Image (spheres, rainbow, N blue to C red):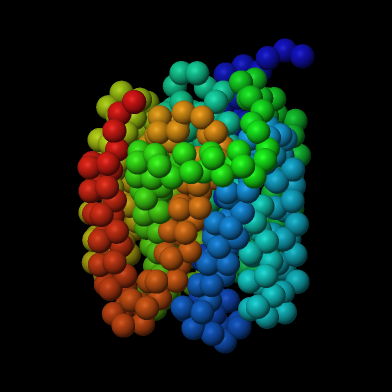
Amino acid sequence: MPQPSPRSRTAAVVLAGFCAFLTIYAPQPLLPLLAREFQTSAAAISLVMTATTTGVMMAAPFIGLVADRFGRKRVIVPASFLMALPATLAATSTGLHSLLFWRFWQGIFTPGIAAVTVAYINEEWETGAGAAMSAYVTGTVLGGFSGRMIAALVASHASWRWSFVTLGLLNAAGAAVMWAWLPADRHFHRGRFSPAAAAQDMLRHLRNPRLLAACAVGFCVLFTLIATFTYVNFYLAAPPFRLGTQALGLLFTVYLVGVVVTPFAGRSIDRVGHRFALAASFAAGIAGILLTLIESLPVVILGLAILSTGVFITQAATSSYIGVAARDARASAVGLYTVFYYAGGTLGSALPGWFWNRGGWPACVALIVTVQASTIVVAVRRWRPA
Protein backbone atom coordinates (compact mmCIF):
# COMPACT_ATOMS: atom_id res chain seq x y z
CA MET A 1 0.00 0.00 0.00
CA PRO A 2 1.57 3.35 -1.02
CA GLN A 3 2.44 5.84 1.68
CA PRO A 4 0.07 8.83 1.83
CA SER A 5 1.38 12.17 0.64
CA PRO A 6 2.10 14.92 3.19
CA ARG A 7 -0.95 16.78 1.87
CA SER A 8 -3.28 13.83 2.44
CA ARG A 9 -1.87 13.31 5.94
CA THR A 10 -2.60 16.93 6.75
CA ALA A 11 -6.11 16.70 5.28
CA ALA A 12 -6.80 13.67 7.47
CA VAL A 13 -5.88 15.42 10.72
CA VAL A 14 -7.90 18.48 9.65
CA LEU A 15 -10.90 16.17 9.23
CA ALA A 16 -10.20 14.62 12.66
CA GLY A 17 -10.31 18.06 14.24
CA PHE A 18 -13.49 18.85 12.33
CA CYS A 19 -15.27 15.71 13.54
CA ALA A 20 -14.08 16.10 17.12
CA PHE A 21 -15.57 19.58 17.41
CA LEU A 22 -18.57 19.44 15.07
CA THR A 23 -21.11 18.69 17.81
CA ILE A 24 -19.38 19.40 21.10
CA TYR A 25 -20.12 23.16 21.13
CA ALA A 26 -23.03 23.18 18.68
CA PRO A 27 -25.73 23.98 21.29
CA GLN A 28 -24.23 27.37 22.20
CA PRO A 29 -26.40 29.48 19.84
CA LEU A 30 -29.40 27.39 20.91
CA LEU A 31 -29.01 28.14 24.62
CA PRO A 32 -31.53 31.02 24.84
CA LEU A 33 -34.00 28.87 22.83
CA LEU A 34 -33.40 25.82 25.04
CA ALA A 35 -33.76 27.96 28.17
CA ARG A 36 -37.24 28.94 26.99
CA GLU A 37 -38.04 25.37 25.90
CA PHE A 38 -37.18 23.89 29.29
CA GLN A 39 -38.23 26.99 31.26
CA THR A 40 -34.92 27.40 33.09
CA SER A 41 -32.26 30.03 33.73
CA ALA A 42 -29.13 30.93 31.79
CA ALA A 43 -26.92 29.35 34.47
CA ALA A 44 -28.94 26.11 34.46
CA ILE A 45 -29.09 25.71 30.68
CA SER A 46 -25.32 26.25 30.50
CA LEU A 47 -25.08 22.75 32.02
CA VAL A 48 -25.70 21.53 28.46
CA MET A 49 -22.11 22.59 27.82
CA THR A 50 -20.83 21.53 31.25
CA ALA A 51 -22.13 17.97 30.84
CA THR A 52 -20.04 17.39 27.72
CA THR A 53 -16.84 18.92 29.04
CA THR A 54 -17.24 16.87 32.25
CA GLY A 55 -17.48 13.68 30.18
CA VAL A 56 -14.34 14.63 28.27
CA MET A 57 -12.49 15.40 31.48
CA MET A 58 -13.39 12.02 32.99
CA ALA A 59 -12.53 9.93 29.93
CA ALA A 60 -9.33 11.65 28.77
CA PRO A 61 -6.77 9.87 31.01
CA PHE A 62 -8.13 6.41 30.15
CA ILE A 63 -8.25 7.15 26.42
CA GLY A 64 -4.56 8.05 26.53
CA LEU A 65 -3.69 4.72 28.18
CA VAL A 66 -5.70 2.77 25.62
CA ALA A 67 -4.10 4.66 22.74
CA ASP A 68 -0.62 3.96 24.15
CA ARG A 69 -1.50 0.26 23.99
CA PHE A 70 -3.48 -0.17 20.76
CA GLY A 71 -2.28 2.67 18.55
CA ARG A 72 -3.63 6.02 17.44
CA LYS A 73 -5.77 5.28 14.40
CA ARG A 74 -7.32 2.23 16.10
CA VAL A 75 -8.72 4.58 18.74
CA ILE A 76 -9.48 7.68 16.65
CA VAL A 77 -11.75 5.99 14.09
CA PRO A 78 -13.95 3.92 16.48
CA ALA A 79 -14.32 6.92 18.78
CA SER A 80 -15.53 8.97 15.81
CA PHE A 81 -18.29 6.46 15.05
CA LEU A 82 -19.29 6.12 18.71
CA MET A 83 -19.53 9.87 19.25
CA ALA A 84 -22.15 10.13 16.50
CA LEU A 85 -24.60 8.00 18.54
CA PRO A 86 -25.28 10.26 21.56
CA ALA A 87 -25.06 13.30 19.29
CA THR A 88 -28.05 11.93 17.36
CA LEU A 89 -29.92 10.52 20.36
CA ALA A 90 -29.89 13.93 22.05
CA ALA A 91 -32.82 14.71 19.74
CA THR A 92 -34.97 12.25 21.73
CA SER A 93 -34.56 14.24 24.96
CA THR A 94 -37.84 14.89 26.79
CA GLY A 95 -36.35 17.24 29.35
CA LEU A 96 -33.16 18.94 30.47
CA HIS A 97 -31.93 15.91 32.43
CA SER A 98 -32.15 13.54 29.47
CA LEU A 99 -30.42 16.10 27.24
CA LEU A 100 -27.63 16.36 29.79
CA PHE A 101 -27.33 12.55 29.80
CA TRP A 102 -26.71 12.33 26.06
CA ARG A 103 -24.40 15.33 26.10
CA PHE A 104 -22.33 13.68 28.84
CA TRP A 105 -21.86 10.52 26.76
CA GLN A 106 -20.87 12.59 23.79
CA GLY A 107 -18.08 14.01 25.95
CA ILE A 108 -16.97 10.51 26.98
CA PHE A 109 -16.13 9.61 23.36
CA THR A 110 -14.60 12.95 22.34
CA PRO A 111 -11.05 12.44 23.74
CA GLY A 112 -10.67 9.37 21.54
CA ILE A 113 -10.48 11.80 18.64
CA ALA A 114 -9.22 15.07 20.10
CA ALA A 115 -6.55 13.90 22.55
CA VAL A 116 -5.27 10.98 20.48
CA THR A 117 -4.96 13.05 17.30
CA VAL A 118 -2.64 15.47 19.12
CA ALA A 119 -0.44 12.51 20.13
CA TYR A 120 -0.63 11.19 16.55
CA ILE A 121 0.68 14.49 15.15
CA ASN A 122 3.50 14.73 17.67
CA GLU A 123 4.66 11.24 16.66
CA GLU A 124 4.05 11.17 12.91
CA TRP A 125 5.51 14.59 12.03
CA GLU A 126 9.26 14.46 12.40
CA THR A 127 9.55 18.13 11.40
CA GLY A 128 7.03 20.97 11.26
CA ALA A 129 4.84 19.71 14.09
CA GLY A 130 3.78 23.30 14.82
CA ALA A 131 2.39 23.73 11.31
CA ALA A 132 0.68 20.31 11.43
CA MET A 133 -0.86 21.14 14.81
CA SER A 134 -2.11 24.42 13.40
CA ALA A 135 -3.75 22.49 10.54
CA TYR A 136 -5.47 20.29 13.12
CA VAL A 137 -6.59 23.34 15.10
CA THR A 138 -7.93 24.80 11.84
CA GLY A 139 -10.03 21.65 11.52
CA THR A 140 -11.34 22.11 15.06
CA VAL A 141 -12.22 25.71 14.24
CA LEU A 142 -14.08 24.66 11.08
CA GLY A 143 -15.89 21.93 13.00
CA GLY A 144 -16.82 24.23 15.85
CA PHE A 145 -18.04 26.91 13.46
CA SER A 146 -19.98 24.46 11.26
CA GLY A 147 -21.65 22.76 14.21
CA ARG A 148 -22.91 26.01 15.69
CA MET A 149 -23.99 27.39 12.33
CA ILE A 150 -25.82 24.23 11.26
CA ALA A 151 -27.52 23.88 14.65
CA ALA A 152 -28.78 27.46 14.53
CA LEU A 153 -29.97 27.31 10.91
CA VAL A 154 -31.78 23.98 11.33
CA ALA A 155 -33.37 25.08 14.61
CA SER A 156 -34.58 28.31 12.99
CA HIS A 157 -36.27 26.49 10.09
CA ALA A 158 -37.28 23.19 11.72
CA SER A 159 -36.59 22.53 15.42
CA TRP A 160 -33.74 22.11 17.85
CA ARG A 161 -34.29 18.32 17.72
CA TRP A 162 -33.51 18.19 14.00
CA SER A 163 -30.35 20.14 14.74
CA PHE A 164 -29.02 17.24 16.78
CA VAL A 165 -30.12 14.65 14.20
CA THR A 166 -28.40 16.53 11.38
CA LEU A 167 -25.15 16.95 13.29
CA GLY A 168 -25.10 13.32 14.40
CA LEU A 169 -25.48 12.08 10.83
CA LEU A 170 -22.75 14.43 9.62
CA ASN A 171 -20.46 13.17 12.35
CA ALA A 172 -21.07 9.56 11.29
CA ALA A 173 -20.29 10.44 7.67
CA GLY A 174 -17.07 12.14 8.75
CA ALA A 175 -16.07 9.05 10.72
CA ALA A 176 -16.49 6.90 7.60
CA VAL A 177 -14.25 9.24 5.59
CA MET A 178 -11.62 9.26 8.34
CA TRP A 179 -11.57 5.45 8.32
CA ALA A 180 -10.65 5.61 4.63
CA TRP A 181 -8.26 8.57 4.69
CA LEU A 182 -6.34 8.56 7.97
CA PRO A 183 -2.91 6.95 7.45
CA ALA A 184 -1.93 4.07 9.70
CA ASP A 185 0.57 4.74 12.47
CA ARG A 186 4.19 4.60 11.31
CA HIS A 187 6.14 5.67 14.41
CA PHE A 188 3.88 4.27 17.14
CA HIS A 189 5.55 2.04 19.73
CA ARG A 190 3.24 -0.07 21.85
CA GLY A 191 3.27 0.98 25.48
CA ARG A 192 2.95 -1.20 28.51
CA PHE A 193 -0.70 -1.68 29.42
CA SER A 194 -0.71 -2.34 33.16
CA PRO A 195 -1.86 -0.35 36.18
CA ALA A 196 1.71 -0.14 37.48
CA ALA A 197 3.07 1.15 34.16
CA ALA A 198 0.21 3.62 33.82
CA ALA A 199 0.81 4.90 37.34
CA GLN A 200 4.52 5.30 36.65
CA ASP A 201 3.81 7.24 33.47
CA MET A 202 1.34 9.52 35.23
CA LEU A 203 3.65 10.16 38.19
CA ARG A 204 6.42 11.06 35.77
CA HIS A 205 4.08 13.50 34.01
CA LEU A 206 3.01 15.04 37.31
CA ARG A 207 6.68 15.66 38.22
CA ASN A 208 7.28 17.39 34.89
CA PRO A 209 6.97 21.17 35.54
CA ARG A 210 6.94 22.07 31.85
CA LEU A 211 4.06 19.68 31.17
CA LEU A 212 2.12 20.95 34.19
CA ALA A 213 2.58 24.52 32.95
CA ALA A 214 1.19 23.46 29.56
CA CYS A 215 -1.77 21.87 31.36
CA ALA A 216 -2.43 25.08 33.29
CA VAL A 217 -2.41 27.09 30.06
CA GLY A 218 -4.75 24.56 28.44
CA PHE A 219 -7.16 25.02 31.37
CA CYS A 220 -7.22 28.79 30.78
CA VAL A 221 -7.55 28.46 26.99
CA LEU A 222 -10.81 26.50 27.06
CA PHE A 223 -12.11 28.45 30.05
CA THR A 224 -11.79 31.62 27.96
CA LEU A 225 -13.43 30.17 24.86
CA ILE A 226 -16.38 28.51 26.63
CA ALA A 227 -17.04 31.41 28.99
CA THR A 228 -17.04 33.91 26.12
CA PHE A 229 -19.13 32.02 23.58
CA THR A 230 -21.63 30.65 26.08
CA TYR A 231 -22.62 33.89 27.82
CA VAL A 232 -22.22 36.24 24.87
CA ASN A 233 -25.33 34.56 23.45
CA PHE A 234 -27.43 35.81 26.37
CA TYR A 235 -25.78 39.23 26.09
CA LEU A 236 -26.67 39.53 22.41
CA ALA A 237 -30.15 38.00 22.78
CA ALA A 238 -31.07 40.77 25.23
CA PRO A 239 -31.56 44.52 24.56
CA PRO A 240 -30.17 46.50 22.82
CA PHE A 241 -29.12 43.74 20.37
CA ARG A 242 -32.10 41.30 20.52
CA LEU A 243 -30.54 38.72 18.19
CA GLY A 244 -32.54 35.60 17.33
CA THR A 245 -31.30 32.00 17.09
CA GLN A 246 -30.25 32.20 13.43
CA ALA A 247 -28.42 35.48 13.97
CA LEU A 248 -26.62 34.01 16.97
CA GLY A 249 -25.50 31.13 14.76
CA LEU A 250 -24.19 33.56 12.16
CA LEU A 251 -22.22 35.24 14.92
CA PHE A 252 -19.82 32.31 14.85
CA THR A 253 -18.56 33.33 11.42
CA VAL A 254 -15.90 35.10 13.49
CA TYR A 255 -14.33 31.65 13.74
CA LEU A 256 -13.49 31.84 10.05
CA VAL A 257 -10.91 34.50 10.81
CA GLY A 258 -9.13 31.88 12.88
CA VAL A 259 -9.30 29.43 9.95
CA VAL A 260 -7.32 31.91 7.82
CA VAL A 261 -4.87 33.13 10.46
CA THR A 262 -4.01 29.96 12.41
CA PRO A 263 -2.16 28.04 9.61
CA PHE A 264 0.15 31.04 9.05
CA ALA A 265 0.60 31.38 12.80
CA GLY A 266 1.69 27.73 12.97
CA ARG A 267 4.72 28.47 10.85
CA SER A 268 5.55 31.39 13.12
CA ILE A 269 5.30 29.19 16.22
CA ASP A 270 8.09 27.01 14.83
CA ARG A 271 10.22 30.15 14.27
CA VAL A 272 9.57 32.49 17.21
CA GLY A 273 8.87 29.91 19.91
CA HIS A 274 5.88 28.83 21.96
CA ARG A 275 6.10 31.42 24.75
CA PHE A 276 6.19 34.47 22.50
CA ALA A 277 3.37 33.13 20.32
CA LEU A 278 1.16 32.51 23.35
CA ALA A 279 1.85 35.85 25.04
CA ALA A 280 1.19 37.84 21.86
CA SER A 281 -1.99 35.97 20.94
CA PHE A 282 -3.56 36.15 24.41
CA ALA A 283 -2.66 39.83 24.74
CA ALA A 284 -4.65 40.36 21.55
CA GLY A 285 -7.44 38.27 23.09
CA ILE A 286 -7.64 40.63 26.07
CA ALA A 287 -8.05 43.58 23.73
CA GLY A 288 -10.74 41.69 21.82
CA ILE A 289 -12.90 40.80 24.82
CA LEU A 290 -12.71 44.39 26.10
CA LEU A 291 -14.10 45.60 22.75
CA THR A 292 -17.30 43.60 23.34
CA LEU A 293 -18.22 46.01 26.13
CA ILE A 294 -18.98 48.65 23.49
CA GLU A 295 -22.69 48.34 22.67
CA SER A 296 -22.24 48.28 18.90
CA LEU A 297 -22.81 44.99 17.11
CA PRO A 298 -19.99 45.48 14.53
CA VAL A 299 -17.55 46.30 17.34
CA VAL A 300 -18.68 43.28 19.37
CA ILE A 301 -18.17 41.05 16.33
CA LEU A 302 -14.70 42.51 15.77
CA GLY A 303 -13.81 41.92 19.40
CA LEU A 304 -14.98 38.31 19.26
CA ALA A 305 -13.01 37.72 16.06
CA ILE A 306 -9.82 39.03 17.69
CA LEU A 307 -10.37 37.02 20.86
CA SER A 308 -11.17 33.75 19.10
CA THR A 309 -8.19 34.05 16.76
CA GLY A 310 -5.90 34.67 19.71
CA VAL A 311 -7.31 31.61 21.48
CA PHE A 312 -6.82 29.39 18.42
CA ILE A 313 -3.19 30.45 18.04
CA THR A 314 -2.64 29.86 21.76
CA GLN A 315 -4.21 26.41 21.45
CA ALA A 316 -1.88 25.51 18.58
CA ALA A 317 1.18 26.75 20.51
CA THR A 318 0.17 24.84 23.64
CA SER A 319 -0.68 21.60 21.84
CA SER A 320 2.64 21.54 19.97
CA TYR A 321 4.49 22.44 23.19
CA ILE A 322 3.34 19.12 24.69
CA GLY A 323 5.65 17.40 22.21
CA VAL A 324 8.52 19.42 23.73
CA ALA A 325 7.47 18.97 27.36
CA ALA A 326 6.70 15.21 27.22
CA ARG A 327 9.32 13.03 25.58
CA ASP A 328 7.61 9.65 26.10
CA ALA A 329 4.15 8.19 26.82
CA ARG A 330 2.80 11.15 24.87
CA ALA A 331 -0.76 9.89 24.56
CA SER A 332 -1.11 9.70 28.34
CA ALA A 333 0.59 13.13 28.58
CA VAL A 334 -1.98 14.49 26.15
CA GLY A 335 -4.66 12.73 28.21
CA LEU A 336 -3.49 14.59 31.32
CA TYR A 337 -3.45 17.84 29.34
CA THR A 338 -6.96 17.12 28.10
CA VAL A 339 -8.20 16.65 31.68
CA PHE A 340 -6.97 20.13 32.56
CA TYR A 341 -8.18 21.56 29.26
CA TYR A 342 -11.74 20.36 29.70
CA ALA A 343 -11.74 21.11 33.40
CA GLY A 344 -11.25 24.67 32.20
CA GLY A 345 -14.20 24.26 29.86
CA THR A 346 -16.35 22.83 32.65
CA LEU A 347 -15.57 25.71 34.98
CA GLY A 348 -15.83 28.14 32.07
CA SER A 349 -19.47 27.20 31.48
CA ALA A 350 -20.41 27.16 35.18
CA LEU A 351 -18.47 29.87 37.05
CA PRO A 352 -19.40 32.80 34.76
CA GLY A 353 -23.05 32.07 35.56
CA TRP A 354 -22.41 33.42 39.06
CA PHE A 355 -20.83 36.55 37.58
CA TRP A 356 -23.66 36.88 35.03
CA ASN A 357 -26.30 36.80 37.75
CA ARG A 358 -24.53 39.57 39.68
CA GLY A 359 -23.08 41.85 37.03
CA GLY A 360 -24.15 40.68 33.58
CA TRP A 361 -21.73 40.66 30.67
CA PRO A 362 -19.27 43.25 32.12
CA ALA A 363 -18.70 40.99 35.13
CA CYS A 364 -18.08 38.03 32.82
CA VAL A 365 -15.58 40.10 30.82
CA ALA A 366 -13.69 41.03 33.99
CA LEU A 367 -13.40 37.33 34.87
CA ILE A 368 -12.23 36.37 31.37
CA VAL A 369 -9.58 39.13 31.27
CA THR A 370 -8.24 37.97 34.65
CA VAL A 371 -7.90 34.40 33.37
CA GLN A 372 -6.18 35.51 30.16
CA ALA A 373 -3.67 37.70 31.98
CA SER A 374 -2.89 34.84 34.37
CA THR A 375 -2.26 32.57 31.40
CA ILE A 376 0.37 34.91 29.97
CA VAL A 377 2.14 35.02 33.35
CA VAL A 378 2.21 31.21 33.62
CA ALA A 379 3.60 30.73 30.12
CA VAL A 380 6.27 33.42 30.40
CA ARG A 381 7.48 32.24 33.80
CA ARG A 382 7.12 28.46 33.50
CA TRP A 383 7.48 27.42 29.86
CA ARG A 384 10.99 26.55 28.80
CA PRO A 385 12.39 25.85 25.32
CA ALA A 386 13.44 22.37 24.25
The N terminus lies in which quarter of the figure? top right
Image position of 68 (left or right of 84): left
Residue at the outermost bottom position: 39
User: Is 152 above or below relative to 77?
Assistant: below
Image position of 141 (left or right of 5): left
Query: In x, y percent, where is residue 332?
Result: 55, 40
Image quadrant in which you'd find residue 198? top right
The number of discs equals 0
Image quadrant in which you'd find residue 147? bottom right
Considering depth in this image, is 119 or 300 the residue closer to the camera?
Answer: 119
Considering depth in this image, is 8 or 297 the residue closer to the camera?
Answer: 8
Query: In x, y percent, where is residue 222?
Result: 43, 54
Query: In x, y percent, where is residue 18?
Result: 58, 43
Considering depth in this image, is 378 or 233 the residue closer to the camera?
Answer: 378
Residue at the outermost front position: 196
Residue found 35% across the figure and 38% down from its top = 210
User: Is 36 above or below relative to 373?
Assistant: below
Query: Is residue 264 visible to us here?
Result: no
The C terminus lies in which quarter of the figure? top left
Residue found 37% across the figure and 78% down from its top = 354
User: Is 247 above or below relative to 286?
Assistant: below
Residue found 29% across the figure and 33% down from its top = 384
Residue found 46% across the figure and 41% down from its top = 205
Query: In x, y percent, where is residue 43?
Result: 46, 78
User: Is 44 above or below relative to 374?
Assistant: below
Image position of 305 (left or right of 288): right
Considering depth in this image, is 93 or 153 the residue closer to the camera?
Answer: 93
Image position of 293 (left or right of 344): left
Query: Is residue 91 visible to us here?
Result: yes
